[in-house]
Image (cartoon, helix red, strand yellow):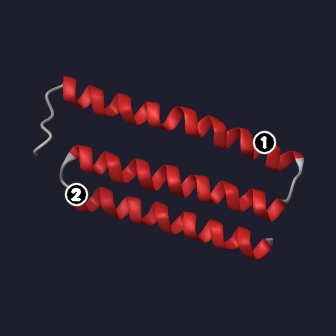
Amino acid sequence: MDIVGNILILLGSILILIGAFGCLKYKNFFSQLHAASVGDNGGLLLILFGLIARDGLTLFSAKIFLLIIIILLTSPTNTHLLAKLAILSGASKND
């Protein structure tokens, strides 16, 4: 399981790096927000699942699983609020 865990951690790190490059590439705020949220959420979840795979079923992996649930509940809400505040402050979708 160490190999699977290491592969998941590596893929998560690559996804976070791709999301960071997407933030630099795009000039539109909403495109940057999308790149950041996909890279951050997907990468972080892959890294956390990789840690669970490496550690096995222990108390540590149960805590990580609870962290995954919290991230899945809060991260889309934060992204939505950022986008809504950008629209309310007058940001254009075409910039």
Q: Within 10 Å of the Cα at label 2, are there few (<14), some (14-19), or many (20+) other Cα atoms?
A: some
Determine the residue located farthest toward the bottom in the rendered image. 3
- The residue that appears at 36% across and 28% down in the rendered structure is 81
Checking the image for residue 63, the label placed there is: 1
Across and down, in percent, residue 48 comes to 67, 54
The answer to which image quadrant residue 19 occupies is bottom left
Q: Amino acid at mark 2?
A: Tyr
Q: Name the element at disc 2.
A: loop
Q: Earlier in the sequence, mark 1 or mark 2?
A: 2
Across and down, in percent, residue 59 comes to 88, 45
Q: Amino acid at mark 1?
A: Lys
The answer to which image quadrant residue 65 occupies is top right
Number of numbered discs visible in the structure rendering: 2
Q: Name the element at disc 1.
A: helix
- The residue that appears at 53% across and 32% down in the rendered structure is 74
The quarter in which the N terminus is drawn is bottom right
- Residue 95 is left or right of residue 22, and the answer is left
Across and down, in percent, residue 45 comes to 60, 52
How many angstroms separate mark 1 from mark 2 (CA)?
36 Å
Question: Can you say whether 39 is above or below 95 in the image?
Answer: below
Across and down, in percent, residue 11 comes to 56, 69
Q: Within 10 Å of the Cα at label 1, are there few (<14), some (14-19), or many (20+) other Cα atoms?
A: few
Marks 1,2: beta carbons within 8 A: no
Viewer-proximal residue, 61 or 20? Answer: 61
- Residue 39 is left or right of residue 53, and the answer is left
The answer to which image quadrant residue 7 occupies is bottom right
Q: Label 2: which residue? A: 26
- The residue that appears at 29% across and 50% down in the rendered structure is 32
Determine the residue located farthest toward the top in the rendered image. 88
